[in-house]
Amino acid sequence: MLSDAADIIEPHENAVMIGTGKGGVGKSTIAAQKAAYHAAQGLRTLLVCVTSQDDDDLGIDRYNRGLRPEGASVLDGAGLLRAIQDRTPLLPIREVRPNLDVVPGGEAVGELLTLLTARMPSEGIYVVASLARALAPIAPWYDRVVIDSAPEQDALEQLALAASRWLFVPTRSDDTSIRGMRRIARNYKLVRSQVNPYVEVAGACLYGSNPTATQLHEEVRQDVAGVLGPNTPMLKTIVGYREMPARNARKKGLTFREYANLLPSSAKSYDVAAGRAERADVVPESIKPLADEMDDLNKEIDAHCRKAA
Ligand SMILES: Nc1ncnc2c1ncn2[C@@H]1O[C@H](COP(=O)(O)OP(=O)(O)OP(=O)(O)O)[C@@H](O)[C@H]1O
Ligand SMILES: [Mg+2]
């Protein structure tokens, strides 16, 4: 049976979803870096990955970081699936970094669609609030909640939107990425009008681009306004495309800032040439600007949420 007001769950005031309807634009990277950024500032932070691919940016799985909850594994999206299935609060992996807890994504998240579809006849549209319900009991523990999302299914995007107070949209400059924004825009409007009236667009940014290509930025700004609405704040910070440090940091399960902090003690190219070190031991200099830009982006996203609030 459908009911109304009782099913509307007010999201955490600082719950930010990183989402757009196109794959591979940097959502998971931004979500993990943002969560770690807040935690490093001393804010209690929760990262929830509503994605069926686990990129493990923080090295939880590969480097065994964090304190696993007792009982069945919560890795590979199993914890997220179980909480929604059993209608219990989310059980995060604690202290992945000081102040940072994580509900990892992974394959099991893909099974949510079947579960939610089976519940539709009894719960109606409020099935979309399933994640919001599992998050609500633990959300007050945190100062910041960051939700990573995946564009593979509308249902997953809607679940994440229903649990969020803010939607932040990263995009690349190509047409497919701009078209991908239409999908998140459609899901945003559906969720806002039917399930979560609190969610708002915090802004958008151009990610992985050349910071000096100002003409291109202006064109993207117009595209974003056309898709997400003319008042959508377009952030000034542009995180550049720096494949090598981004790839290496993910491989090592380190944030950009943590990887940049290894620079002073890193092996150098001449050490590799002299046979004293492996290529993989050399931290590329370009991690420094990448880490700085990511910090700037996080500061700016936070400032926009505050201003909009
Ligand atoms: N600034 C950057 N420059 C170059 N490559 C980057 C940068 N940031 C992230 N990447 C790389 O781009 C790829 C896609 O990033 P990411 O996984 O964060 O995207 P996504 O939007 O979450 O993708 P999906 O939709 O598949 O979940 C990854 O290989 C990542 O390491
Ligand atoms: Mg991702």
Image: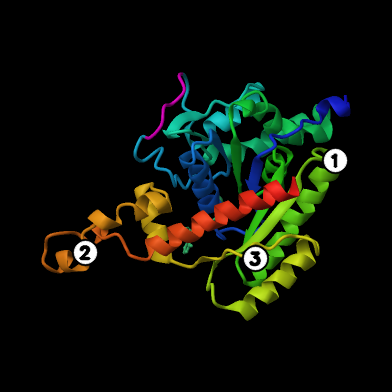
Within 10 angstroms of label 2, few (less than 14), some, or many (20 or more) residues? Answer: many
* Residue 226 magenta: no
Within 10 angstroms of label 1, few (less than 14), some, or many (20 or more) residues? Answer: some
- As drawn, the residue found furthest toward the top would be 71
Which disc, if any, is residue 194? 1
Could you tell me if the residues under marks 1 and 2 are in contact, i.e. CB atoms within 8 Å?
Answer: no
Amino acid type of the residue tagged 3 in the rendering: Ser
Within 10 angstroms of label 3, few (less than 14), some, or many (20 or more) residues? Answer: some
Estimate the spatial distance between the alpha carbons at disc 1 and disc 2, rounded to whole Å.
56 Å
Q: Quadrant of residue 191?
A: top right
- Screen quadrant of the C terminus: top right
Q: Where is mark 2, residue-wise?
A: 268
Q: How many marks?
A: 3
Q: Residue 147: image x %, image y %?
A: 61, 42
- Going from N to C along the chain, the mark reached first, 1 or 2, is 1
**Left or right of 186 in this view: 261:** left
Amino acid type of the residue tagged 2 in the rendering: Lys
Q: Is residue 297 above or below residue 76?
A: below
Q: Where is mark 3, residue-wise?
A: 177
Q: Residue 6: image x %, image y %?
A: 84, 24
Residue 2 appears in the rendering: no
Estimate the spatial distance between the alpha carbons at disc 3 and disc 1, rounded to whole Å.
26 Å
Could you tell me if the residues under marks 2 and 3 are in contact, i.e. CB atoms within 8 Å?
Answer: no
Estimate the spatial distance between the alpha carbons at disc 2 and disc 3, rounded to whole Å.
37 Å
Q: Nearer the viewer, residue 4 or 294?
A: 294
Q: Nearer the viewer, residue 26 or 118?
A: 26
**Left or right of 140 in this view: 78:** left
Q: Residue 154: image x %, image y %?
A: 71, 48
- As drawn, the residue found furthest toward the bottom would be 215
Range of magenta residues? 65-70
